[in-house]
Amino acid sequence: MFEVCANGVESCLAAQEGGADRVELCAAIPEGGTTPSYGEIKVARRVLTTTRLHVIVRPRGGDFLYSDLEVERMAADIAVCRELGVDGVVFGCLNADGTIDMDRNRYLLEQARGMSVTLHRAFDRALHPEQALEDVIALGFDRILTSGQQPKAVQGIDLLARLHRQAAGRIILMAGSGVTEKNIREIHEKTGLREFHFSARESCQSGMRYVNPNLYMGRPGANEASLDYTTARRVAATISQLLG
């Protein structure tokens, strides 16, 4: 199963063309992904005809310790996803001590009943991954997106393999972060995992002919003259490493 982390409708279309089974639609990829807009979700739902649509529900970047008001917004976003016909949602809440927040996750799971539900890489900030795995299974999530608590999944192979053995078919583990056509086969062979999450993006030059050199819309020094999009070519190339 191949899931593409899509940063917009254009990337969703490329993922579908390249043969992805599913996309996770996100905004603010440099922050680790936040909830996309209503319009982004609505148009993505319209254009995705053969690829399933999952949407991240994350109100901000940073940690995964959420206030009651933040959880209220997350529940509202899940309701919007349901209204728009989204196939699944992706979220995760932690306690301050790094344990899985059973109460908040359970509440959000109730709001998402009937949809596929993934616990995202909040798992990679859990204090005890083996206990966190048991807690997530007990809550009833369908899958966990994880890099094996390392910056890149290829670096977390040992933990991914241990967690896969521990899960023993009770939940799906999906490897993500830095998964490419160059390492997906190695990750699969060394962990036994069968679901993979990757972006397959390439940089495209902006069409702007004039850019004010004294002004940045975001972080000073960032390259705002290029845009990163998923390409069908890279999606297909990554998938072909396991199916080709």
Image: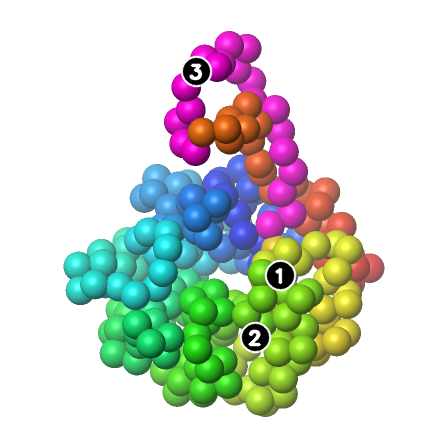
Query: Is 17 or 129 nearer to us in this picture?
Result: 129
Using a 10 Å C-alpha cutoff, classify the residue at mark 2 as few (fewer than 14 neighbours), some (14 to 19) or many (20 or more): many
Q: Secondary structure at mark 1?
A: loop
Residue at mark 1 to residue at mark 3: CA–CA distance? 35 Å
Residue occupying the point 35% across, 64% down: 64
Identity of the residue furthest to the left in this view: 69
Residue 108 visible from this viewpoint: yes
Q: Which mark is residue 88?
A: none
Q: Secondary structure at mark 3?
A: loop
Identity of the residue furthest to the right in this view: 244
* Nearest-to-viewer mark from 3 and 2: 3
Q: Which mark is residue 214?
A: 3
Query: Is 210 or 44 nearer to us in this picture?
Result: 210
Left or right, 10 with reference to 82: right
- Tell me the residue that label 2 is attached to: 173
Name the N-terminal-most of marks 1 and 3.
1
Cβ–Cβ below 8 Å for labels 3 and 2?
A: no
Above-or-below relation of 184 to 231: below
Name the N-terminal-most of marks 3 and 2.
2
- Tell me the residue that label 1 is attached to: 152
Above-or-below relation of 110 to 50: below
Magenta stretch holds residue 208: yes
Left or right, 149 with reference to 40: right
Magenta-drawn segment: 199-219
Residue occupying the point 34% across, 71% down: 94
Residue occupying the point 58% across, 38% down: 229
Report the number of discs. Answer: 3
